[in-house]
Image: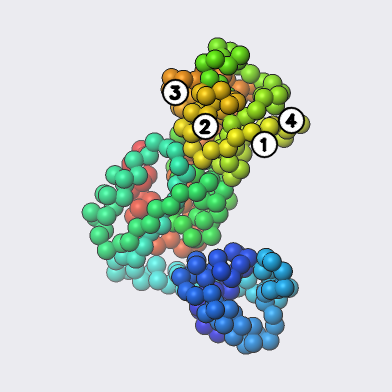
Amino acid sequence: MELRQLEYFVAVAEEANFTRAAARVHVAQPAVSAQIARLERELGQRLLDRSRRETRLTAAGEAVLPHARAALNAVADVRVAVDELTQLVKGTVTLGTVTSHNVDIPTLLADFHRAHPAVEMTLSTDNSDALIDGVQSGALDAAIVSVGPDEVPSGLSAEVVADEAIDAAVGLDDPWSGRTSISLAALAERSLIALPIGAGIRAQLENACAAAGITPHVAFEASTPIALAQLAERGLGVAILPQSVSRTHSGLSAIAITPELRGRLVFAWRSTGPISPAARVLVDMARDLLR
């Protein structure tokens, strides 16, 4: 049994797809299939059900998965221990972020690169749900994500970037322009403009509406708050925006939502499991920057 077999097996189990798993571990898909087949022959059991569109674990695969993860984590811990003993910072760091925030990422990465030029850095963007999953699984070292007002995702630590109210916002020619507040029930009667499912602000809206027994009608989605603001400015509906955007965009009339919705933007990293010396340095630098 080889570590790469366990690595490939965990990747397929988490991605539920051989092609995506191969891309994640940076090898060709046939090599992933071959190594997992060798692992299954060695164990004498099928670990994956390949008969469906989405690859699923068999009962044996479910039993093996936590042990495979534990073995890989143990190896990572060994590498971290040796690196820390020699005070060596090298390798790679992977940072993820939502598309809109006020953190000076270029300065953070430039300062880190000057201090540790041997470390390769990767920056990616996605919605908050995907980024949180990435940090929890170890695919990302840290991420800037949107969460609920009192939420810290399981297994993560977080430094607050921003904590603000969520507004409704309409164009200046809209019948609601000039209103100071609006209820969730009234919002449900209008076409809404919101971030996609998986974004933190969208989750706060959906959760509040579900608790009130209301189904919101989201007519338009866009990937950034600025794009939402531009759509609302042109009269296409009511945008759901962080207050920092709704109250600074000159073409909008901001309206407080009652009961109040709030969202937090946080810098999050793993609080459990291995974290490389390079990632630890990046996290410490980011926390210093935010403070």
Question: Which mark is drawn over residue 140?
Answer: none
Q: CA distance from mark 4 to mark 1?
A: 10 Å
Q: CA distance from mark 3 to mark 2?
A: 11 Å
Please, which residue is most extreme toward the left here?
114
Q: How many residues crowd mark 4 within 10 Å: few (<14), some (14–19), many (20+)?
A: some
Q: As shown in the figure, which amino acid type bears the numbered disc 1?
A: Asn
Q: Position of residue 46 (x, y in %)?
A: 69, 80
Q: Position of residue 224 (x, y in %)?
A: 49, 37
Sequence order check, earlier mark of 2 and 4: 4
Residue under pointer 3: 249
Sequence order check, earlier mark of 2 and 1: 1
Q: As shown in the figure, which amino acid type bears the numbered disc 4?
A: Ile
Q: CA distance from mark 2 to mark 4?
A: 22 Å
Mark 1 element type: helix
Residue under pointer 1: 207
Which is more toward the observer, 29 or 122?
Answer: 29
CB within 8 Å, label 1 to label 3? no
Question: Which residue corresponds to the image point at 43% horizontal and 19% vertical from the top-left?
Answer: 250
Question: Which residue corresponds to the image point at 43% horizontal and 22% vertical from the top-left?
Answer: 248
Q: As shown in the figure, which amino acid type bears the numbered disc 2?
A: Leu
Sequence order check, earlier mark of 4 and 1: 1
Q: How many residues crowd mark 3 within 10 Å: few (<14), some (14–19), many (20+)?
A: some
Q: How many residues crowd mark 2 within 10 Å: few (<14), some (14–19), many (20+)?
A: many
Question: Which mark is drawn over residue 228?
Answer: 2
Q: Is residue 229 left or right of residue 42?
A: left
Residue under pointer 4: 214
